[in-house]
């Protein structure tokens, strides 16, 4: 790509800014229509961002009866895991999850996993 002069870059920036302004102007009527439809249907931003509807194809969550309080599981943090493997380049691995590439490549090169054990 050839180097452009400062004047050419400024002209290009001005052109792109005009395109951006035109895109913003054309977006305004669509936003207005969406807001009007949301108001008509009684939909709020919170309705759109609700985690309970995720994966339900936009259907509202099932209604709860008085005695059926929904139980939610709280994920417990397991804390940090000690590093078990380290190479001379500073790459580390805890021994959990998929074996990292650096260790796979070292094993293919003939080194043993135990040679990296801390």
Image (tube, helix red, strand yellow):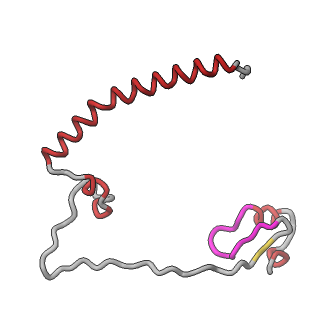
Q: Is residue 6 above or below residue 102?
A: above
Q: Is residue 52 above or below residue 76?
A: above
Q: Is residue 45 left or right of residue 115?
A: left
Q: Is residue 1 left or right of residue 97?
A: right
Q: Residue 12 or 108: which is nearer the viewer?
A: 12
Q: Residue 79 or 26: which is nearer the viewer?
A: 26
Measured as percent of width and height from the top left, residue 88 is found at 86, 68
The magenta-colored residue range is 90-101
Q: Residue at x 79, y 61 (%)?
A: 105
- Write down the quadrant of residue 55 in the picture: bottom left
Measured as percent of width and height from the top left, residue 33 is found at 22, 35
Measured as percent of width and height from the top left, residue 100 is found at 71, 65
- Write down the quadrant of residue 35 in the picture: top left
Q: Is residue 57 left or right of residue 39?
A: right
Q: Residue at x 49, y 25 (%)?
A: 17
Q: Is residue 96 above or below residue 104?
A: below
Q: Is residue 68 above or below residue 103?
A: below
Q: Quadrant of the N terminus?
A: top right
Predominant SS of the magenta segment: loop
- Counting labels gives 0
Q: Quadrant of the C terminus?
A: bottom right
User: Does 94 lie within the magenta span?
Assistant: yes
Q: Residue at x 39, y 23 (%)?
A: 22
Q: Residue at x 28, y 58 (%)?
A: 56
Measured as percent of width and height from the top left, residue 20 is found at 45, 27
Q: Residue 71 or 42: which is nearer the viewer?
A: 42
């Amino acid at each position: 790509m050839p180097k452009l002069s400062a004047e050419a870059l400024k002209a290009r920036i001005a052109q792109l800014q005009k395109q951006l302004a035109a895109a913003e102007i054309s977006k305004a009527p669509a936003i207005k229509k969406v807001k009007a439809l949301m108001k008509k249907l009684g939909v709020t931003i919170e309705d759109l961002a609700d985690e309970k509807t995720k994966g339900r194809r936009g259907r509202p969550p099932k209604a709860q009866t008085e005695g059926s309080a929904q139980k939610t599981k709280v994920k417990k943090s397991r804390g940090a895991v000690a590093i078990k493997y380290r190479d001379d380049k500073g790459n580390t691995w805890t021994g959990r999850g998929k074996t990292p590439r650096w260790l796979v490549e070292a094993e293919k090169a003939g080194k043993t996993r135990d040679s990296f054990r801390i």
